[in-house]
Image (spheres, helix red, strand yellow):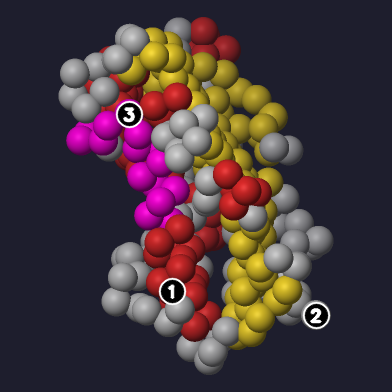
Amino acid sequence: MSSRSASFPATLVLLLACTLLAAACGGSSTTPTPGSHGAAASTGAGAVPAASPAAAATAAPVAASQLAGAAAALDNLTSYRFSVKVRGTGAAMPSASGQGGTFGMDGTVVLKPQKALSVSMSGMGDGAASGLAVGYTIIGDSAWMQLGGTAMPLPAGQGATIQQTIDAFSPQRVFGQSFDQYLSGMHQVGQEQKNGVATIHLQADAQSLDALARAVGGGTGVPGTWKMDLWVARDGGYMVSAVTSGSYEVNGAPATMLVQIDISGINDPANRVVAPS
C-alpha cells in the first residue's frame, strides 16, 4: 500500500471487476495469484494471548508474528460467512458521477466435508449499474453465475478459475492488502465479543496511522483522522473483523474511505451452499 494514492479503494474495485469478467469469459491468463482460501492451512495463528486488564489499559503491543496468520487461520474452520466492504467519498473513490462509491462482497465458505462457496458482489459499476449484483456459486468442480436473478451454469473447469479469482479478493487477501505492513504497530486495547466470538481487540499506534496517511497521500501524507482496528479470536487466532478508515482532505476537498472485513457464523451448521435452481 505504500505507493497507492488516495484512490486505492477504487483501484481495488476496478481490478476485481476486470478479473471477474475475464474469468467468467474463460480468460485465465489474467487470473491473479490465488490466495490461501480453499486450501487447508498447515499452520494457523493459534490462540492469541489474552490481555490482562492492566495490559489492555496500557495498550500492550503484540508481536506481528502472532497476527500474521490471523487471516490464513480461517482455513482451519469448517465453515463461515464473510462480508467485505470498500467505501469511499470524494477523491477516495472517484466515479463517473463524481459522487464516490461502495463495493460489497458477501459470501458463505464451506471447507468441510466438501469445499463450496457462494458469493454476491455489488457496487462494481457506476450510476444504474452500481446496484447490479453479480453472484457465483461453486460446489466442487461445478460453478454457476447469477446475474439479474438468472443463474447460468459455467463451462466445466470454470469453477476453479472463478474461485482463484475470488480468492484474490477474499478476506485473507484484502486483509493483507490493508493490514499486513502495519501489524507490528498493533496494540491490544481490550477483550470483546465481536460477531459472536470472544476476541482480542487491537488498534494501530500513532506511527502506523501516520504511515497509513502517507501511503494514502502518495507518500506526502494527507491531513485527517485515521483509524485501524483488528479483532482476533482468542481461541483459534483467526481474524474476526478488520476495519481501516479515514476522513481527510485531498487538494482541499473532503474525502472518506473505509475498508471493512467481517467474519461471522463460525462453523454454523446453517452455513450451506446449494446449487441454484
Q: Amino acid at mark 3?
A: Ala
Residue 217 as seen in the image, left or right of residue 16: left
Q: Residues within 10 Å of mark 3 (few under 14, many from 20)?
A: many
Q: Secondary structure at mark 1?
A: helix
Q: Amino acid at mark 2?
A: Ser
State the separation of the CA atoms marked 1 and 3: 28 Å
Residue at 73% x, 74% y is 150
In the image, the segment drawn in magenta is 2-16
| Screen quadrant of the C terminus | bottom right
State the separation of the CA atoms marked 1 and 2: 22 Å
Residue at 46% x, 68% y is 21
Q: Which mark is residue 6?
A: 3
The numbered mark, 1 or 2, whose residue comes first in the sequence reads 1
Q: Amino acid at mark 1?
A: Ala
Residue in front for this viewpoint, 182 or 190:
182
Q: Position of residue 91 (x, y in %)?
A: 39, 27
Residue at 50% x, 36% y is 97
Quarter-of-image position of residue 168:
bottom left
Q: Is the stretch drawn in magenta largely helix, strand or loop? A: helix
